[in-house]
Amino acid sequence: MKQINIFDIKLHPFRRSEFISLIRQKLKDGQQMAQFGVNSATVNEIAGNEEYRRAINNADLLNIDGMSVVWALRCLGYKVPERVATPDLADDVLTMAEKEGFSVFLLGAKEAILLKCIANLMARMPSIIIAGHQHGYYDQGEDSYIIEKINEARPDILLIGMSSPKKELMCEKYRSELNAKYILGVGGYFDILAGYTRRAPKWMQNIGMEWFFRFIQEPRRMWRRYLLGIFKFMWLVLKERSSKTVIDD
């Protein structure tokens, strides 16, 4: 499988269509697979968080979620065909699930948002199989109950709508206990489906300015991540100017 080893993690420079083909095949084969997106905030965080870095690397697939990471890799000489934004990938996964009859469990977000998300999803995809759902605001002591609830639903696909690194660490800790065949960390995707958060217009996404659209919606929450984070990310990119290799095995 083609991958890029950089920032002490592995990245998979595939197109969305390639990810979906691989996910579909693994689902049909019954092989468990976990996937997360990587953006500049991820790269910044793992630089000082070994537990998070280990959880990221133990995932089977890492899509390049941020345009800044795409640009950085291309500047460093790597071939990256496109950015694979996690919300777009999640849309494709759900479309595939409806078409192929794979069941889905939604974990994360507030209860009201999750219920609205499911209602909108059912209206858009009436044939999709929602095996179950669970809001993300539960106590740590309820972890065993949540895992049992997911396993009782026996979903083919588990979408984890939590922030990073919470979703990655949760998957790392309980993956061996989960019977879901495909696990995808989707961050704030449920808020988007519910209509509580808007994505940037396509033209802003295409020029790599989706981060700015998020910043102007939530400046108090996002200013540190974006305005300070960009300098840390640029410094980490400069550190990576030493030779790296693309592996194809």
Image (spheres, rainbow, N blue to C red):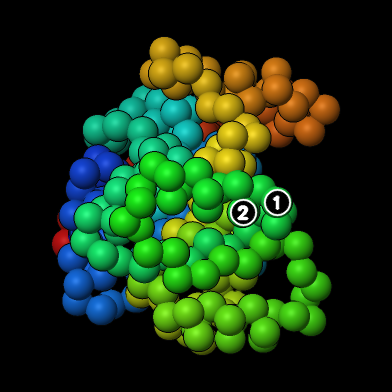
Whether residues under marks 1 and 2 lie with C-beta atoms below 8 angstroms apart, the answer is: yes
Closest to the observer, 1 or 203? 203
Q: Which residue is mark 1?
A: 112
Is residue 247 among what the camera can see? Answer: no
Q: Amino acid at mark 2?
A: Leu
155 lies above or below 15:
below
- Helix, strand or loop for disc 1: helix
User: Image point 76% across, 69% down: which residue?
Assistant: 138
In-image side of 200 versus 12 (left or right): right
Where in the figure is residue 223, as x and y percent of width and height? 76, 26
In-image side of 102 versus 208 (left or right): left
Q: How many C-alpha atoms fall within 10 Å of the one at disc 2: few (<14), some, or many (≥20)? A: some
Q: How many C-alpha atoms fall within 10 Å of the one at disc 1: few (<14), some, or many (≥20)? A: few
Q: Which mark is residue 81?
A: none
Mark 1–mark 2 Cα distance, whole angstroms, equals: 5 Å
Is residue 215 among what the camera can see? Answer: yes
Q: Amino acid at mark 1?
A: Ala
In-image side of 48 versus 157 (left or right): right
User: Image point 35% across, 48% down: which residue?
Assistant: 125
Q: Which mark is residue 115?
A: 2
Where in the figure is residue 77, as x and y percent of width and height? 30, 31
